[in-house]
Image (cartoon, rainbow, N blue to C red):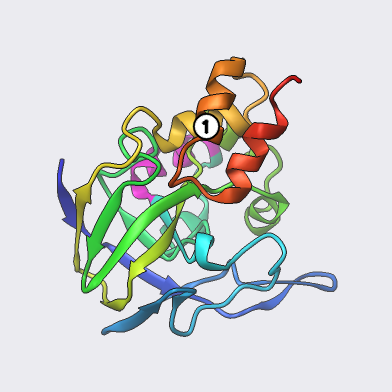
C-alpha cells in the first residue's frame, strides 16, 4: 500500500472535561483547506502542554481499521460514529500501527510529515467513553495511533491523498515500539531497548524511555 484518502481532518479547543480538568479531545471536522504548521493544525490546541503538543506531537493520526474491534468491545457506542472518537486529527483506512514505521514520511496535501512516536493512552479516553478498561485494551491490541512532526508546512484538507514517500526505521513499526515501551506483557530484551534508544527519528522522549529500561 502506498496511498489512501484522508477520511477526516479534525481540530478542537480545550473545554471543561472532568472537574477542573480541561481537554481538547473532543475534536470536530473542518471543511476546506487548513494550514498545517510546525506545531500542528491551525485552530487546533492542547490543554495539557506537559504531556501533549509541541513539534514532536504536532498531529495525531488514528486508524479507522480498528473500528470493528472497538464496536465488538464497546458495543454500539455513539462516539464511534463521530469523526474523531479518539481525539485524532487525521483518520484513514489502510494505514495501521503494524504497517507504519517510526520515521516514515507522508505527503498529505502540501505538507510533509514524519512519524515521531506512538500515542500513549491516558485516563481521558476512558472518561470520554465512560468505560473502564480501554487503556488496557489499547495496550493489548496496540491500537494506539501515532504522532507526526511536520517537516514541510503546507495546506491540508479532507480528501487529500495520504501517500507514504519514504520508509523510516523499517524494522520498527509503531506497534513494535509501542509494545516494547508501554505494554508490560511484552518482554522486550535489553538489545531491543538499546536499538530503540538509537532510532534517530523517534522522539527524544521515547528514546529516553528506552534508555531508562537499560540495566547498568
User: What is the quadrant of the N terminus in the image?
Assistant: top left
Q: Is residue 202 or residue 141 the one in the foreground?
A: 202
**Residue 19 at x, y percent in the picture:** 84, 70
- Name the residue that disc number 1 marks: 196
- In the image, residue 148 sits, relative to residue 140, either above or below, namely below
User: What is the quadrant of the C terminus in the image?
Assistant: top right
**Residue 108 at x, y percent in the picture:** 24, 65
**In this view of the protein, can residue 188 be seen by the observer?**
no
Name the magenta segment's main secondary structure. Answer: helix
Q: Is residue 185 left or right of residue 18?
A: left
Q: Give the quarter of the image for residue 9.
A: bottom left
> Which residue of the protein is positioned furthest toward the front in this rendering?
216
Q: Is residue 114 left or right of residue 7?
A: right
Secondary structure, mark 1, is: helix
- In the image, residue 69 sits, relative to residue 128, either above or below, namely above
Q: Give the quarter of the image for residue 99.
A: top left
Label 1 Cα crowd, 10 Å radius (few <14 / some 14-19 / many 20+) = many
Residue at x 58%, y 25% (from the top left corner): 193
Residue at x 26%, y 42% (from the top left corner): 167
Residue at x 27%, y 62% (from the top left corner): 7
Does residue 64 belong to the magenta stretch?
yes
Q: How many marks?
A: 1
Residue at x 68%, y 49% (from the top left corner): 122
**Residue 111 at x, y percent in the picture:** 27, 70
**Residue 202 at x, y percent in the picture:** 48, 45
Does residue 62 belong to the magenta stretch?
no
Q: Is residue 60 or residue 151 the one in the foreground?
A: 151
Q: Which residues are magenta?
A: 63-73
**In this view of the protein, can residue 181 be seen by the observer?**
yes
Amino acid at each position: 500500500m502506498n496511498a489512501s484518502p484522508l477520511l477526516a481532518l479534525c481540530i478542537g479547543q480545550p473545554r471543561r472535561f472532568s472537574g477542573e480538568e480541561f481537554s481538547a479531545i473532543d475534536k470536530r471536522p473542518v471543511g476546506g483547506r487548513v494550514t498545517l504548521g510546525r506545531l500542528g493544525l491551525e485552530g487546533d490546541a492542547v490543554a495539557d502542554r506537559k504531556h501533549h503538543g509541541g513539534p514532536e506531537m504536532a498531529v495525531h493520526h488514528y486508524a479507522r481499521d480498528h473500528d470493528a474491534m472497538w464496536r465488538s468491545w464497546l458495543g454500539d457506542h455513539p462516539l464511534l460514529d463521530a469523526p474523531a472518537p479518539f481525539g485524532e486529527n487525521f483518520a484513514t483506512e489502510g494505514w495501521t500501527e503494524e504497517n507504519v514505521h517510526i520515521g516514515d514520511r507522508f505527503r498529505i496535501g502540501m505538507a510533509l510529515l514524519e512519524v515521531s512516536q506512538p500515542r500513549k493512552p491516558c485516563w481521558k479516553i476512558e472518561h470520554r467513553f465512560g468505560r473502564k478498561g480501554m487503556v488496557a485494551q489499547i495496550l493489548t491490541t496496540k491500537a494506539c495511533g501515532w504522532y507526526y512532526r511536520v517537516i514541510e508546512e503546507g495546506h491540508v484538507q479532507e480528501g487529500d491523498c495520504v501517500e507514504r514517500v519514504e520508509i523510516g526505521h523499517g524494522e520498527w513499526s509503531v506497534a513494535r515500539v509501542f509494545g516494547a515501551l508501554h505494554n508490560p506483557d511484552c518482554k522486550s530484551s535489553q538489545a531491543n531497548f538499546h536499538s530503540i534508544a538509537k532510532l534517530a527519528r523517534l522522539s527524544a522522549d521515547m528514546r529516553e524511555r528506552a534508555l531508562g529500561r537499560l540495566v547498568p
